[in-house]
């Protein structure tokens, strides 16, 4: 518990020192709010929540991938990860401590999205659940990418295209039945389905997101144990 708290505190401090990362949690809901007020609410042909759901899905699906990848890669580059492993920090402790603050910030941002969207009680519950679950998945995916990278530059080069692909695949799927058929296994597709249609199969969406989390967690643990002492 002490290791998790120390890593959490360190990440919170580092994040507030890095405006480039901090602004990500502000710009997505800000854009959603501005577009909703200036465009959606003044145009009867556009759903009031269209920009909220669009920006929320992009934020949860890809916004956190590059940030968490950068944090892990930075620890590898500085040899901090090696020392943490030698000190006995377990994979789950490192992931919770390092990614925990990102998840907390993502949850707060999700609440802001929900307030802008002015959803009903049930809709808000579904929205926040899928958003937080999606954010957690993105953080773990970023952690896996970070573990596979030798330095910060490599993590950025690898995480950016992956984030773009998984983030925009649901958008492409809305225009292609073939893409939609295969996109169903991605957590980003399930986020997009729920935030755009609260009557969709919520249980199925959570199951798919849960399977994504399970696979990525296993990958992270294996890579952490195999690679950590080598870096």
Image: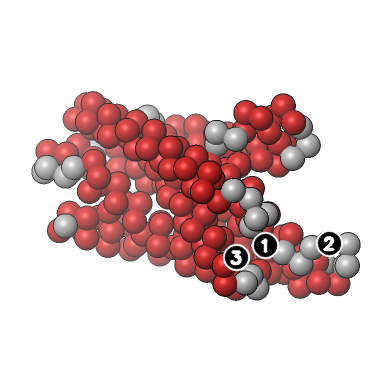
- The reply to whether the C-beta atoms of the residues labelled 2 and 3 are less than 8 Å apart is no
Circle nearer the N terminus (1, 3): 1
Q: How is the image coloured?
A: secondary structure
Image vertical order of residue 75 relative to residue 227, above or below? below
Q: Which residue is mark 1?
A: 52
Front position among marks 1 and 3: 3
Q: Disc 1, disc 3: CB below 8 Å?
A: no
- For marks 2 and 1 on the same chain, the one whose residue lies earlier in the sequence: 2
Which residue sits at x=30%, y=46%?
95
Residue 147 position, x and y percent, is 34, 34
Residue positioned 34% across, 62% down in the render: 12
Q: Residues within 10 Å of mark 1 (few under 14, many from 20)?
A: many
> How busy is the neighbourhood of tag 3: few (under 14 within 10 Å), some, or many (20 plus)?
some
Q: CA distance from mark 1 to mark 3?
A: 13 Å
- Disc 2: which residue: 46
Discs 2/3, front:
3
Q: Position of residue 197 (x, y in %)?
A: 67, 54
Q: Is residue 76 visible?
A: yes
Name the secondary structure under disc 3.
Answer: helix
Looking at the image, residue 96 lies above or below residue 15: above
Q: Where is residue 24 shown, x and y percent of the image?
A: 54, 58
In the drawing, does residue 116 fall left or right of residue 100?
right
Tell me: 100 left or right of 228.
Answer: right
Q: Which residue is mark 3?
A: 123
Q: Position of residue 65 (x, y in %)?
A: 48, 44
Please tell me which residue is depicted at 57% across the width and 72% down the height of the picture. Answer: 121
Judge by depth and name the residue closer to the eye, 158 or 189. 189
Q: Quadrant of residue 154?
A: top left
Figure quadrant of residue 184: top right
Along the polypeptide, which appears first: circle 2 or circle 3? Answer: 2
**Could you say which disc has been placed on residue 91 in the image?**
none
Q: Quadrant of the N terminus?
A: bottom left
């Amino acid at each position: 518990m002490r290791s998790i708290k120390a890593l959490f505190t360190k990440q919170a401090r580092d994040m507030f020192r890095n405006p480039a990362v901090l602004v990500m949690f502000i710009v997505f809901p800000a854009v959603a709010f501005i577009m909703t007020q200036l465009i959606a609410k003044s145009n009867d042909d556009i759903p009031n929540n269209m920009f909220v759901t669009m920006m929320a899905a992009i934020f949860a699906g890809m916004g956190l991938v590059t940030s968490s990848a950068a944090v892990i890669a930075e620890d590898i580059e500085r040899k901090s990860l090696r020392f943490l492993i030698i000190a006995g920090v377990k994979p789950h402790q490192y992931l919770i401590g390092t990614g925990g603050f990102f998840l907390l910030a993502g949850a707060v941002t999700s609440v802001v999205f929900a307030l802008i969207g002015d959803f009903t009680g049930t809709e808000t519950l579904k929205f926040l659940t899928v958003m937080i679950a999606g954010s957690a998945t993105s953080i773990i995916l970023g952690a896996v990418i970070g573990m596979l990278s030798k330095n910060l530059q490599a993590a950025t080069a690898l995480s950016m295209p992956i984030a773009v692909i998984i983030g925009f695949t649901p958008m492409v799927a809305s225009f292609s039945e073939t893409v939609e058929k295969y996109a169903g296994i991605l957590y980003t597709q399930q986020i997009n389905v729920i935030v755009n249609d609260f009557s969709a199969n919520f249980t199925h969406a959570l199951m798919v997101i849960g399977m994504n989390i399970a696979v990525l967690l296993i990958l992270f643990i294996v890579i952490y144990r195999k690679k950590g002492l080598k870096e």
